[in-house]
Image (tube, rainbow, N blue to C red):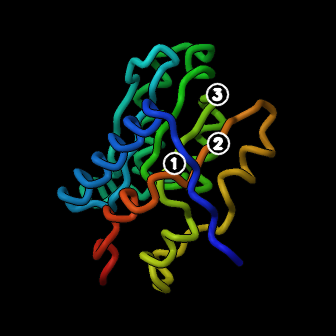
Amino acid sequence: MSLPQAQTLNDSDGRYLREAIALADMARERGNRPFGSLIVAADGRVLARASNANGESGDCTAHAELSAIRLASPLHSRDELTRATLYSSAEPCVMCAGAIFWSAIGRVVYGIDAERLRVFRGERLDQKDAELSCRDVFQAASHAIECIGPALIEEASSSHQGAWKV
Ligand SMILES: [Zn+2]
């Protein structure tokens, strides 16, 4: 099976996705898995930024996307979130895809895809992800969720170089 093709981003999507990748690198520097996410309103205001915090908190659900949604959701209307974009340094896992669905966020842009990420995760059983694409979750949703990715694959991959070694 061939790997998913990189998608081309416009300037603002590229800028925000690079910021998500920078948040992933910050997570790694603090001893966490290298993932970052931000949520941006339709008018360009950043509603939330978050990094993975599994290592620091011991909370297995402390994924960047889920944490960003927990920050933004109580403060912003469903209508505003519908028109917002969630940027993630990597393809959202099935848990985060579910949270994106519940948040009503209408658009997702991600960096490295889950298939390429598995090469970094290796074959360690404790690092295996549920092999269900975020697109499968979004397609089952009762509202439209636009999904763009993978994108900036090389930049998004660089956060993971050597980060998953035992
Ligand atoms: Zn996740």
Name the secondary structure under disc 2. strand
Name the side, left or right, on which 77 lies relative to 87: right
Q: In the rendered view of the protein, which quadrant contains the N terminus?
A: bottom right
User: Mark 2 or mark 3: which comes first in sequence?
Assistant: 3
Residue beneath the point at 56% across and 69% down: 129
Residue on which the image places disc 2: 147
State yes or no: discs 1 and 3 in contact (Cβ < 8 Å).
no
Image x and y of residue 40, in percent = 45, 26
Give me the C-alpha separation between circle 1 and circle 3: 17 Å
User: Mark 1 or mark 3: which comes first in sequence?
Assistant: 3
Name the side, left or right, on which 37 lies relative to 165: right
Residue beneath the point at 32% across and 64% down: 158
The dot on residue 25 is none
Residue on which the image places disc 1: 110
Q: Residues within 10 Å of mark 1 (few under 14, many from 20)?
A: many
Residue 163, quarter of the rendered image: bottom left
Residue 145, quarter of the rendered image: top right
User: Mark 2 or mark 1: which comes first in sequence?
Assistant: 1
The amino acid sitting under disc 2 is Cys
Give me the C-alpha separation between circle 2 and circle 3: 13 Å
Q: Nearer the viewer, residue 110 or 165?
A: 110
Whether disc 1's CB lies below 8 Å from ligand 1 is answered no
State yes or no: discs 2 and 1 in contact (Cβ < 8 Å).
yes
State yes or no: discs 2 and 3 in contact (Cβ < 8 Å).
no
Q: Residues within 10 Å of mark 3 (few under 14, many from 20)?
A: many
Residue beneath the point at 28% across and 47% down: 22
Residue depth check, mark 1 versus mark 3: number of the one nearer the observer: 1
Residue beneath the point at 39% across and 18% down: 45
The amino acid sitting under disc 1 is Tyr
